Image (spheres, rainbow, N blue to C red):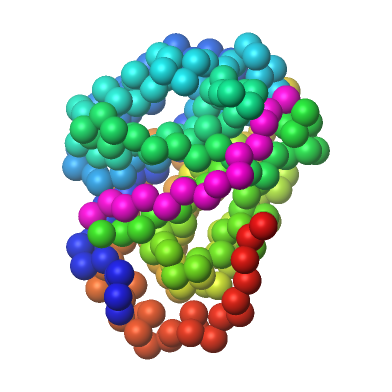
Amino acid sequence: MRGLPVEDLTVTVLQQALVWQDAVANREAFGEVILALREPSDLVVLPEMFTAGFSMDSEKVAEEAEGPTLAWMREMAAVSGAVVVGSYGVRARQGVVNRLVWMRPDGSFEFYDKRHLFRMAGEHERYAAGDERLVVELKGWRCCPLICYDLRFPVWCRNRNDYDLLLFVANWPAVRAFPWRTLLLARAMENLSCVVGVNRVGVDGNGYAYSGDSIVLDAQGRALVEPLDREGAFTAVLSAHELRRFREKFPASLDADDFSLV
């Protein structure tokens, strides 16, 4: 089928606890994990707000757009030879945003600002929302990276025949672990797309516990790696052949309804 990848994609998810509002400590911890990776990967994925935890003290945790975390991500991508992805607070023209950065080994990058802000924690009052979805290419895979609460909005996540991999970085509390896994499975199956969901473990500064539950799914919703509540780096290989074969055998996208986002 037109536009489908022909090469496999190796994805590594980093699931670990975060130090509350301490960017230096978090960068050091994740840096040690990335530098210790034993096998090469194409894509290394960190959780949402990986420099601070899900803090609503946006002014305290935010950095300038060309700040130390962007420089660190550039260094990690260059050293590992992988695209490095994660979100953190950034001061932008419209206010502080929860920004996902897609950093390539050559130092070039793209970004996505979180569209759906988690009002139950007051995120919509402390951060500005983005309004554009991002699709980037890696080894022929069209990748759509989103952030946490975006997972609950299937229209925003909908595959308009423009991606092969849907990716979510998150700080998703343990109390809602069942919806997290269920919605990731649904997004994979309804979009005929591989899905990566990366979450944290530990307890944050507000006392909320996180059970991890990061997962890598194929387009049929089958788990390729599922570390549950363990800390560490976990790697899976996404098969281009299997994705192509499944979409050719089960082309449900041909019967999808047309729609547009305003």
Say if residue 29 shows up in the picture. no
Look at the image and give the residue range highlighted in magenta.
126-139
Quadrant in the rendering for residue 234: top left
Above or below, 198 against 93 in this view is below
Quadrant in the rendering for residue 261: bottom right
Above or below, 137 against 83 in this view is below
Which residue is rendered at x = 53% and y = 32% of the image?
A: 99
Is the stretch drawn in magenta largely helix, strand or loop?
Answer: loop
Above or below, 159 against 15 in this view is below
Which residue is rendered at x = 20% and y = 27% of the image?
A: 79
Q: Say which of 92 and 246 sits in front.
A: 92
**Residue 56 percent location from the top left of the image:** 70, 23
**Residue 76 percent location from the top left of the image:** 28, 26
**Residue 215 percent location from the top left of the image:** 47, 53
Q: Say which of 173 and 92 sits in front.
A: 92
Q: Is residue 149 left or right of residue 28?
A: right
**Residue 32 percent location from the top left of the image:** 31, 22
Quadrant assignment for the N terminus: bottom left
Which residue is rendered at x = 30% and y = 70% of the image?
A: 4
Quadrant assignment for the C terminus: bottom right
Which residue is rendered at x = 27% and y = 22% of the image?
A: 75
Q: Is residue 193 left or right of residue 124?
A: left
Say if residue 217 shows up in the picture. yes
